[in-house]
Image (cartoon, rainbow, N blue to C red):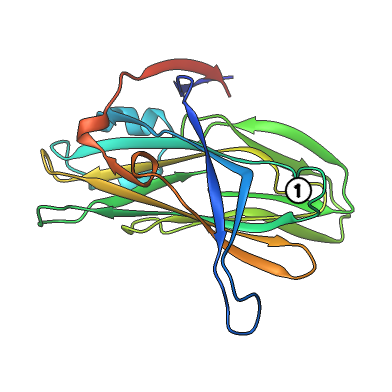
Amino acid sequence: MEPVTSLVLPILPGHDVDLVVPATLQGRTTEERIARRLTVTEPFVTRLALDQLSELGVDPVLLAPLPSGDDYFVVAFVTTFRPAPDGDSASFVDARVGIRLTAPNGGRQPVTLALSPDTASAASGSSLRFALAVPLGVVEPTVEYTAGGSREERYITAYGLGSSDPEWLLRDAPGHPLAGDVLLAVVVRAPTGSAVRAEVVVAASLKRLRLLRSRAELPSRLHTIDLPAQVGHAVFQGVAE
């Protein structure tokens, strides 16, 4: 088995954030705030050299035309979906985590080169075997299954490769409740020396007697990330593939 380079993340401070359900004309007439259900960590940002991208498993087809002079970053953070406390039956149905990449000073916009995880799915009715994959260098769960299952339930889907506004859709699925820690990471390409900003948005739907669509109220240190200013020291290690 050949070793694969893995990016080792430090312990990231987490912050509980409120989910805000807005008032609607057809439903409740006052805003509802749901506390202690979602935690978002402060982001980890590191700068990468072009050759490190291939070591971390970024698609070689995307790497071939890239100039070595551009800046390349990894941004990673964890979202934690917590179970309902006693007295509250609301469970998570789905969530969206989006990142808007911008160049505040103008010029060429930063774009997404890779997302982790990109997809994760399970086949309902199949026997499951968990494995680990490291396509981006951050260890993420995948599921392998035997033939004979009835249908596949995809519970994580990433969108926006090559764009400036990538996002993940996370769904509650049989055997994979939307609960616990989810590590998300994106590889960003930007012009050399340019200012790069990432704005994070988290939305979630919960089911009580009806569907509650909410948006996380993120403080500025979690919502707006200045990539060059927040670059930290990266640690890499080999992992057997």
Where is 42 relative to 94, above or below?
A: above
Residue 64 in sight in this render: no
Q: How many marks?
A: 1
Q: Is mark 1 on a helix, strand or loop?
A: loop
Which residue sits at x=58%, y=24%? 241
As drawn, the residue found furthest toward the front would be 30
In the displayed structure, does residue 225 sit left or right of residue 114?
A: left
Q: Which of 111 and 179 is in front in this view?
A: 179
Q: Which amino acid does label 1 sit on?
A: Pro
- Pick the quarter of the image with the N terminus: top right
Q: In which quarter of the image is residue 24?
A: bottom right
Q: Kindly identify which residue carries mark 1.
A: 177
Q: Which of 40 and 217 is in front in this view?
A: 217
Which residue sits at x=45%, y=46%? 115
Where is 10 relative to 62, above or below?
A: above
Q: Position of residue 88 (x, y in %)?
A: 78, 52
In the displayed structure, does residue 220 sit left or right of residue 179?
A: left
Q: Position of residue 213 (x, y in %)?
A: 61, 66
Q: Which of 124 and 216 is in front in this view?
A: 216
